[in-house]
Amino acid sequence: QVQLVESGGGLVQAGGSLRLSCAASGSISSFNYISWFRQAPGKQRVLVARISSGGSTYYADSVKGRFTISRDNAKNTLYLEMNSLKPEDTAVYYCNVWKVGYDYWGQGTQVTVSS
């Protein structure tokens, strides 16, 4: 059992930056994929960024070049650095860790980008 707690969300003007953190109650190194998802009101939850246990990263086209996913296995923490934020980035952001038979989610943190 792993509990995930996101932090770092808030209100920021367009063009600004935020750094989200996801603290895990246990080791994250054993999970094949650790990811950030986001969900805007009335929209489906979508994958924003993902890093595999092998270090391979994936970014949605909408955030590529602006967001950076990283992890600190020693601290059992996942990060999402968000730069050049746009109003369309407004959403609840969720941390996720996954391996076969295990799928854990955080409670989400609100990011609001004003125009």
Image (tube, rainbow, N blue to C red):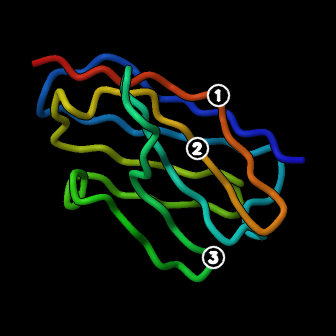
Q: Label 2, secondary structure: give it.
A: strand
Inter-mark Cα distance, 2 to 3 = 15 Å
Q: Tag 3: Cα neighbours inside 10 Å, few (<14), some, or many (≥20)?
A: some
Q: In screen coordinates, is 17 left or right of 49?
A: left
- Residue 56 in percent (x, y) is at 47, 79
Inter-mark Cα distance, 1 to 3 = 23 Å
The label number, if any, that marks residue 53 in the structure image: 3
Q: Which of these two is toward me, 8 or 91?
A: 91
Labels 2 and 1 touching (C-beta < 8 A): no
Q: In screen coordinates, is 51 left or right of 62?
A: right
Q: Measuring 73% from the left and 68% from the top, which residue is drawn there?
A: 29
Say which amino acid is labelled 3.
Ser
Q: Where is 22 relative to 28, above or below?
A: above
Q: Where is 99 relative to 76, above or below?
A: below
Q: Measuring 24% from the left and 21% from the top, which residue is drawn there?
A: 12
**In terms of sequence position, does the residue under pointer 1 or pointer 3 come before the other?**
3
Say which amino acid is labelled 1.
Gln
- Residue 87 in percent (x, y) is at 17, 27
Q: Measuring 39% from the left and 51% from the top, which residue is drawn there?
A: 48
Say which amino acid is labelled 2.
Cys
Q: Which of these two is toward me, 101 or 71?
A: 101
Task: Check the image and name the residue furthest to the bottom.
Answer: 54
Q: Provide the residue designation for mark 2.
A: 95
Q: In screen coordinates, is 114 left or right of 17?
A: left
Q: Provide the residue designation for mark 1.
A: 107
- Residue 73 in percent (x, y) is at 68, 64
